[in-house]
Image (cartoon, rainbow, N blue to C red):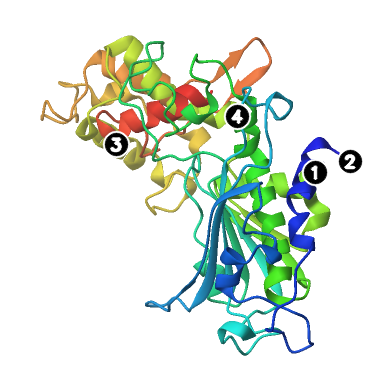
């Protein structure tokens, strides 16, 4: 049994000792109300030293969202260097468990109250940092769980990172973008990375299962995971590490192969900074050259549909968009300089190999995002400069 599992099971020790109450489910099992979860230590959450900031409230129906019991807290179960943190640090997974109302709180129509008997753990996007919403689950009768995966993206630091790449990357203790992975001295915090990688979602699901059992007085029937993009990556993590915990996993558009696409995402800004002294191109210039590539190659697959499907057969050269070239824009804010065209060609068309081992994917001709100056470029550079 791993240290992580032992620590979590110790945190749940309180929850296995539910005390008596007058409220019961249809089978006679003692169950709490939503507010009891916050106020009555007998149910294992109030006073549990492994969590902080506990709240449990009935959220009224609003718009398309049904009434549900929302339990929020921060999981501080894991602590210290043995879990990859600095001395004195702990996990800080902000976790939300959304519960369709049980019979005590007026729920009806399900196997117990409004609950359909099943659980959905809901994935994040990007670098996470915000607690996933749960109403998509509770509205359809599921218990839903969400987490920020152990860092809070609203914590920012206006001091730029003094180290290359360019000064668009915030220095620690910012937790915005991927900077959560750094210690204050710039070294790697492996605990925070593992929290983001898989531990946060795993803990959210375990807490969801346990709290559902307390609130409804019975074990769940099916346990599901659903997520897209980073949530898709998290779904792969759940499948590979904790597959036996789940009855079904929907992992859409998974953001995997980070050593490839992560570098690719920031590469355009790296090249532009080196060659032009700026992050990316001005938006009108990039939009113009991108549309020219699209016009040149859209029909290669036999269908003109606004997409380049046969990217490997597209040989558009950004030098055709240089100011003064035949057919190039006559607007100096849209046509390219020779240096800008060279950067576009390096960004879109190059294939790189590092140490004869690492293949780095490139964005294809006609790709219409990321490589821009201004706020978009700064956001991209902030994320990927630290992520790689």
Identified at 19% across, 31% down, the residue is 327
Residue found 31% across the figure and 35% down from its top: 376
Q: Is residue 369 visible?
A: yes
Secondary structure of residue under mark 3: helix
Q: CA distance from mark 1 to mark 2?
A: 7 Å
Q: Earlier in the sequence, mark 3 or mark 2?
A: 2
Q: Is residue 362 visible?
A: no
**Residue 6 drawn at (x, y percent):** 82, 42
**Residue at label 1?**
5
Specify whether 337 is left or right of 146.
left
Q: Determine whether the residue tagged by mark 1 lies in a helix, strand or loop.
A: helix
Return the residue nearer the eye: 8 or 312.
8
Task: Nearest to the eye among marks 3 and 1: give it.
Answer: 1
Residue under the point 34% across and 35% down: 293
Find numbered disc 4 in the image and state the secondary structure of the residue it sits on: loop
Mark nearest the camera among 4 and 3 is 4
10 Å crowding of disc 4: few (<14), some (14-19), many (20+): some
Q: Please tell me whether mark 2 sits on a helix, a strand or a loop.
A: loop
Gap in angstroms between the C-alphas marked 2 and 4: 23 Å
The crowding category of the residue bearing disc 3, from other C-alpha atoms within 10 Å (few below 14, some 14 to 19, many at least 20), is: many
Residue under circle 3? 292
Q: Which residue is mark 4?
A: 89
Q: Give the mark, 3 or 1, whose residue is nearer the N terminus.
A: 1
Quarter of the figure that contains the C terminus: top right
Q: Which mark is residue 1?
A: 2
Q: CA distance from mark 3 to mark 1?
A: 55 Å
Tag 1 and tag 2, C-beta contact below 8 Å: yes
Q: Residue 178 — which label?
A: none
């Amino acid at each position: 049994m791993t240290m992580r599992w032992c620590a979590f099971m110790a945190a749940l020790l309180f929850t296995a000792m539910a005390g008596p109450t007058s409220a019961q489910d249809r089978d006679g099992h003692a169950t709490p109300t939503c507010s009891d979860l916050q106020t009555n230590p007998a149910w294992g959450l109030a006073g549990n030293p492994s969590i902080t900031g506990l709240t449990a409230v009935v959220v009224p129906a609003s718009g398309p969202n049904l009434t549900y019991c929302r339990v929020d807290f921060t999981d501080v179960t894991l602590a210290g260097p043995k879990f990859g943190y600095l001395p004195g640090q702990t996990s800080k997974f902000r976790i939300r468990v959304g519960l369709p109302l049980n019979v005590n709180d007026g729920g009806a129509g399900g196997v117990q109250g409004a609950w359909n008997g099943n659980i959905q753990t809901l994935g994040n996007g990007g670098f996470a940092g915000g607690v996933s919403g749960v109403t998509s689950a509770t509205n359809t009768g599921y218990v839903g769980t969400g987490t920020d995966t152990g860092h809070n993206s609203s914590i920012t630091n206006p001091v730029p990172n003094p180290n290359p790449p360019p000064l668009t990357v915030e220095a620690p203790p910012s937790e915005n973008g991927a900077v959560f992975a750094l210690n204050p001295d710039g070294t790697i915090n492996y605990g925070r990375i593992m929290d983001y990688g898989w531990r946060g979602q795993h803990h959210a699901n375990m807490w969801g299962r346990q709290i559902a059992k307390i609130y409804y007085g019975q074990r769940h029937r099916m346990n599901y995971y659903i997520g897209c993009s980073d949530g898709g990556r998290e779904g792969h993590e759940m499948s590979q590490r904790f597959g036996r915990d789940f009855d079904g996993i929907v992992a859409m558009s998974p953001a995997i192969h980070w050593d490839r696409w992560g570098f690719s995402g920031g590469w355009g800004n790296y090249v532009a900074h080196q060659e032009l002294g700026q992050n990316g191109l001005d938006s009108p210039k990039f939009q113009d050259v991108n549309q020219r590539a699209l016009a040149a190659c859209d029909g290669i697959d036999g269908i003109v549909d606004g997409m380049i499907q046969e990217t490997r057969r597209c040989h558009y050269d950004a030098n055709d968009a240089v100011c003064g070239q035949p057919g190039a824009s006559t607007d100096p804010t849209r046509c390219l300089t020779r240096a800008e065209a060279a950067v576009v060609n390096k960004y879109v068309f190059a294939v790189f190999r590092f140490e004869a081992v690492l293949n780095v994917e490139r964005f294809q001709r006609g790709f219409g995002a990321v490589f821009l100056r201004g706020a978009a470029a700064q956001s991209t550079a902030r994320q990927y400069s630290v992520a790689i």
